[in-house]
Image (cartoon, grey):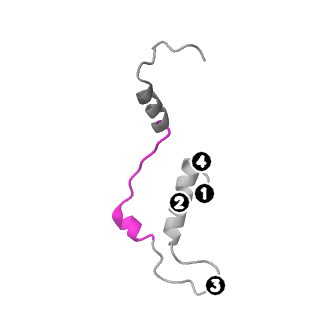
């Protein structure tokens, strides 16, 4: 990388911009969040029943799209 064409004078703003550069915000509908709770148990031992299959699938899609780890 070469030298920057512009001299940085406000370092605190520059550092803040670097930190926020990797930030991502997205909104999920309130009704969708309410449907993420699992309402019925599957009847077997082992797996808990806090989150529905839709919630788990949504987390996996976000993971795959943004190449994130769980």
Q: Are marks 4 and 1 in contact (CB under 8 Å)?
A: no
Disc 2 or 4, which lies upstream in sequence?
2
Question: x, y (%) of residue 45?
Answer: 64, 84
Callout 3: few (<14), some (14-19), or many (20+) C-alpha neighbours within 10 Å?
A: few
Q: Magenta part of the protein: which range?
A: 21-36
Relative vertical location of residue 43 with respect to residue 64 in this rendering, above or below: below
User: Is residue 18 found inside the magenta-colored segment of the image?
Assistant: no
Question: x, y (%) of residue 9?
Answer: 42, 18
Disc 3 or 2, which lies upstream in sequence?
3
Element at label 1: loop
Instruction: Using the numbered discs, state the Cα–Cα distance from disc 4 to disc 1 in whole angstroms.
Output: 10 Å
Residue 25 as seen in the image, left or right of residue 48:
left
Where is the C terminus found, in terms of image quarters? bottom right
Relative vertical location of residue 5 with respect to residue 41 in this rendering, above or below: above
Please name the residue that numbered disc 1 is placed on: 70
Instruction: Using the numbered discs, state the Cα–Cα distance from disc 1 to disc 2 in whole angstroms.
Output: 8 Å
Q: Nearer the viewer, mark 1 or mark 2?
A: 1
Q: Nearer the viewer, mark 4 or mark 1?
A: 1
Tell me, for residue 45, which label it has, or none: 3
């Amino acid at each position: 990388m070469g030298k920057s064409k512009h001299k940085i004078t406000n370092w605190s703003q520059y550092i803040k911009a670097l930190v926020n550069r990797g930030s991502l915000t997205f909104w999920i509908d309130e009704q969708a969040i309410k449907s993420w709770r699992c309402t019925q148990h599957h009847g077997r031992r082992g797996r808990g029943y806090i989150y529905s299959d839709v919630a788990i699938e949504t987390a996996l899609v976000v993971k795959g799209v943004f190449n994130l780890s769980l």
